Image (cartoon, rainbow, N blue to C red):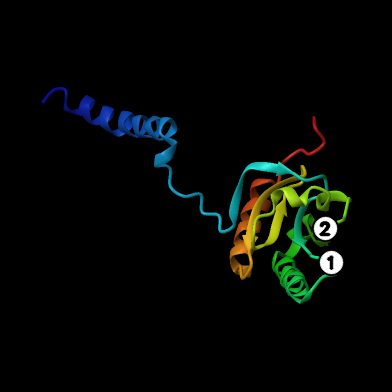
Amino acid sequence: MRYLPVIWLVIVFAVPIGAAWTLVLQPQWHPDSGNHGELIQPPVPVGGGRGWTLAVPASGPCIEACEQTLHLLRRVERALGVESRRVQSMACPPASNEGPCAGLARALTEGTALVVVDPMGNAVLRYAHGFSPFDLLDDLERLLRVSKNWRTDGK
């Protein structure tokens, strides 16, 4: 009876620390990340841009599906409000050698409708055709919140 408070203190403080270390050492037990797009692991360097870039791969001139995706992206950017100044969207024709479009082919898979490129020029997420704009908006809000204090000047 005399050691009961000490035992409770150990349970209250040591068990959560032990559980945390177990999760650190066993990454397969982590819950899903919660992102809606397909995470590109490892990130593919595609070329620099300014801010977050939503790159839409276009075959030849921007066909109807590409134009619909760009229209959808403009609506998502408007929904971001003030943070929309940190996001740009662009159509990337296959022969383009500028900015994020230069290396985009390395990040594409069959059926890719959109690739999200971070401010450091890495393709980090891709979305298949028919993606939900609400899912994209949710992912972008999270990315913008997390990257608010990133330094991209290399210092």
Q: Position of residue 61 (x, y in %)?
A: 85, 69
Mark pair 2, 1: CA separation: 7 Å
Q: Is residue 84 visible?
A: yes
Is 26 on the left-hand or right-hand side of 108?
left
Q: Where does the C terminus fall, quadrant-wise?
A: top right
Disc number for residue 60: 1
> Which residue lies at the image location 37% right of the left edge and 32% below the top edge?
22
Q: Are marks 2 and 1 in contact (CB under 8 Å)?
A: yes
Return the residue found at the far left.
Answer: 1
Identity, as a three-letter code, of the amino acid under mark 1: Gly
Nearer-N-terminus badge (2/1): 1
Q: Nearer the viewer, residue 28 or 136?
A: 28
> Which residue lies at the image location 16% right of the left edge and 27% below the top edge?
4
Q: Position of residue 153 (x, y in %)?
A: 82, 36
When asked about the image quadrant of residue 74, the answer is bottom right
Is 149 on the left-hand or right-hand side of 90?
left
Mark 2 surroundings: few (<14), some (14-19) or many (≥20) residues within 10 A: some
Give SS at disc 1. loop
Q: Position of residue 107 (x, y in %)?
A: 70, 50
> Which residue lies at the image location 58% right of the left edge and 54% below the top edge?
38
Q: Where does the N terminus fall, quadrant-wise?
A: top left
Disc number for residue 114: none
Q: Position of residue 123 (x, y in %)?
A: 71, 48
When asked about the image quadrant of residue 65, the answer is bottom right
Give SS at disc 2. loop
> Which residue lies at the image location 59% right of the left edge and 57% below the top edge?
37
Mark 1 surroundings: few (<14), some (14-19) or many (≥20) residues within 10 A: few
Disc number for residue 94: 2
Identity, as a three-letter code, of the amino acid under mark 2: Pro
Q: Is residue 50 visible?
A: no
Q: Nearer the viewer, residue 93 or 15?
A: 93
